Amino acid sequence: MVDPRTSVIHERLAKIGRIVAVSSGKGGVGKSMVATILALTLARQGCKVGLFDLDFTSPSTHIILGAPNVKPKEEKGIIPATVNGLEYMSLIYFVGDNPAPLRGADISNALIELLSVTQWGKMDFLVIDMPPGIGDAILDLVRLVKQIEFLIVTTSSLLAFQTVRKQVALLCELNIPIIGVVENMKMNKAYGIQEKTEKLGLKYLGAISFDEQAESAIGDMEKLLSTSISKKIGQIVQTKVLAKK
Amino acid sequence: MHEWALAEAIITSARQIAEKEKLKEVSEVTIKVGELQQVEPKILRFALSQMKTDLFKHAKFRILKAKSTLKCRVCGAAWKFNTKKIDIATAEAIHFVPEVAHTYIKCPKCGSPDFEIVSGRGVWLEDLKGAK
């Protein structure tokens, strides 16, 4: 018996310029916020961008986007709904606000299903909001998505950075490109994340200070794009590390 | 029309197998569709017929249905998936992503959502026959 779904994934993603997985070894470092703002920033610069929330058990990008109650279209597969200018896909379409208690094999199966039936079309970027850690989602993406690249988010905490080290070691071992590391919610005291990142041979993309305005900007795109997080992400995008292909 | 995307995957996968086996023509493709995903065989068959390339010119598509068995990881109870016990919106969500069954279905004995989909999840390419 053969699972036919994986055979078509490459084709489904073939017209996407760059696929960027926003990832971290730890939860709570602001991956979803960085992924969403990154996608919105790229879209505001005229790129065609998709956002795929792969954090199946704790999705939150729909809240950050203030996504209305939209549904994807069914047309020879699933066509993502357009939300605030982004082609948006999330398990939330199918589970609503209910919990999705999925074990590893279920996460893999759901991920393969969505990758094989989602018709993304031609896009400049697909930004993926990853679940934390180095579990099933990361292993499946690395296995199934040939052009995947990672953008890693950490905080200033040693606890977060230690998990980042492990993730970087895994990705390097698998020869997966890493765009760089973003230090989010930077504390005033310096903990040397830049030096530590550079010691790993990675690009330190910049620090984002803790922004108290961010919470009240959730769901409001104009407010969100005027936060200091957005400004910093805008600067990172300007450095051309995320240039169109 | 989600079946079209699955049909495309079946054709692509069957073509890859035929190429690997150096088959010049495929005579029969056996597909198993799990009850949980509620794939409509008529639509799937039509989609497959529309995607036929020369390799599949004379191919027969056999579509077999597989009963879906669910087994509770907490109390060990096993039961069959039954669309009559769920509403249309839930059935549709499970049709798109069968794993979301864990959101809507509970063990009939102990009420746990922690169950295993033992069989009959989705679409499988069961067998392929052809001539070299």
Image (cartoon, grey):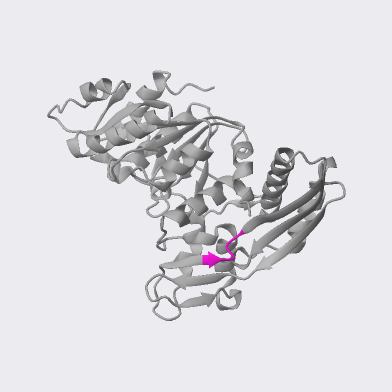
- Residue A19, horizontal then vertical, whole percent: 50, 32
In the image, what residue occupies the spot 49% across and 61% down? Answer: B100
Note whether A59 is above or below A148 in the view shown.
below
- Residue A56, horizontal then vertical, whole percent: 43, 52
Q: Quadrant of residue B124?
A: bottom right
- Residue A71, horizontal then vertical, whole percent: 56, 54
Q: Residue furthest right?
A: B58
Q: Quadrant of the C terminus of chain B?
A: top right
In the image, what residue occupies the spot 64% across and 57% down? Answer: B123
Q: Residue furthest top?
A: A239
Going by the image, does A153 lie left or right of B100?
left
Note whether A199 is above or below A54 in the view shown.
above
Q: Quadrant of the N terminus of chain B?
A: bottom right
Going by the image, does B74 lie left or right of B25?
left
- Residue A42, horizontal then vertical, whole percent: 46, 29
Note whether A63 is above or below A242 in the view shown.
below
Determine the main secondary structure of the stretch shown in magenta.
Answer: loop
Q: Nearer the viewer, residue A125 or B20?
A: B20
Residue numbers of the magenta segment = B118-122
